[in-house]
Amino acid sequence: MMLKTYLTAAGASVLKRVKPSSSVPVERIAGADSPRQVSTVVADPQDVAEFCRVVAEPVRNTVPVTWLHAQGFGPSLTLMSAPDFPVAVVGMVHIANTVTQHEPVLVGESVTVTVWIDSIRTHAKGTEIVVAARFEVDGRLCAEERSHYLAKGVRVPGADEYEQPERTPFDPPQATMEWRFTPRTADAYARVSGDVNPIHLNGLAAKAFGFRGRIIHGMYTAARALAAVQVRDDAFTWDVEFATPVVLPGRVAVRVDRSGSTTSVDAWNPRRGKPHMLSTVTV
């Protein structure tokens, strides 16, 4: 199912490069009155358990928010592949995520997933697309998410003016653990998440988009980071910033640092010292 969505997205992207979308007011595509994708998914015990095993999350009777993110990813691709969407979805880069869990979703529950384009705003390197998602069970809001994507080199007329805060320089700390990723890691995550983007699964496709080879899913690295925190609270906020991709096979240095109600998990290249992912969990 997700492969078909990717093929549709790829086709729409090619057409937009050949013939750009006609100018459509941004407020018709993004914001409070923009189109919604609504679906219902059951947190199947076997599916959730397999997802947990792949991302090193303990199998419990609750669903990790990273599994919820995967359920909203397909609908977000559908929205960004619409004929009037102003940028090509293929080639966009996932740059940040924020998830707030208000209460956990239990394994076996039916989840209503609502996804829409929250905003299209300016970015120093192009245009930023912010995708919003809500996850509800029996009318109760359990979690909400904002996923941020960058369309490099693209300017959209009418995009909201926004100035990104300056990134704090990263100074590699003392690592507390190391992760090793192989092509099989990406294969496994693609299977349980449905994210079959070719840049993660095919070396030639990855090189076509400017990477040295296959790269691990950013959300896999993020999911591993959240699993390392071992959150026991029902309510928390999780912020993730993606920096440089991890080329497969690869080693990643990691530090987990707990300070009061906030735990940070940072991952970086142990040889070059460049960050791959920075994250915090606040309870």
Image (cartoon, grey):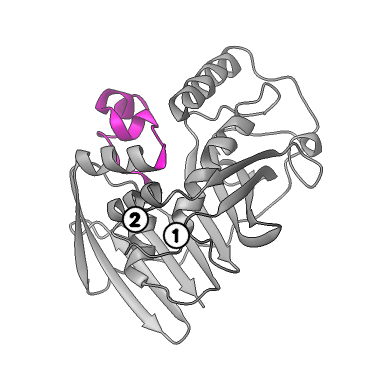
Q: Is residue 215 above or below residue 172?
A: above
The residue drawn where x is 50% and y is 64% is 239
Give the SS element for disc 2.
helix
- Residue 196 lies, in percent from the top left, at 38, 32
Q: Which residues are magenta?
A: 193-217
Q: Is residue 76 above or below residue 144?
A: above
Residue 129 in sight here:
yes
Q: Mark 2 near mark 1, Cβ–Cβ under 8 Å?
A: yes
Residue 149 in sight here:
no
The residue drawn where x is 44% and y is 60% is 64
> 269 or 80: nearer the eye?
80
**Number of the label disc, if any, that sits on residue 38:** none
> 227 or 156: nearer the eye?
227
- The quadrant in which residue 275 appears is bottom left
Q: Is residue 15 above or below residue 49?
A: above
The residue drawn where x is 71% and y is 57% is 139
Which tag, 2 or 1, sits closer to the chain's start? 2
Q: Which residue is mark 2?
A: 52
- The quadrant in which residue 158 appears is top right
The residue drawn where x is 39% and y is 64% is 226
Q: Is residue 257 above or below residue 276?
A: below
- Residue 9 lies, in percent from the top left, at 53, 24
Q: Disc 2 marks which amino acid?
A: Cys
Marker count (numbered):
2
Q: Disc 1 marks which amino acid?
A: Pro
Give the SS element for disc 1.
loop
The stretch drawn in magenta includes residue 208:
yes
- Residue 180 lies, in percent from the top left, at 18, 53
> 175 or 282: nearer the eye?
282
The stretch drawn in magenta includes residue 276:
no
**Number of the label disc, if any, that sits on residue 64:** 1
The residues bearing labels 2 and 1 have C-alpha atoms spaced at a distance of: 8 Å
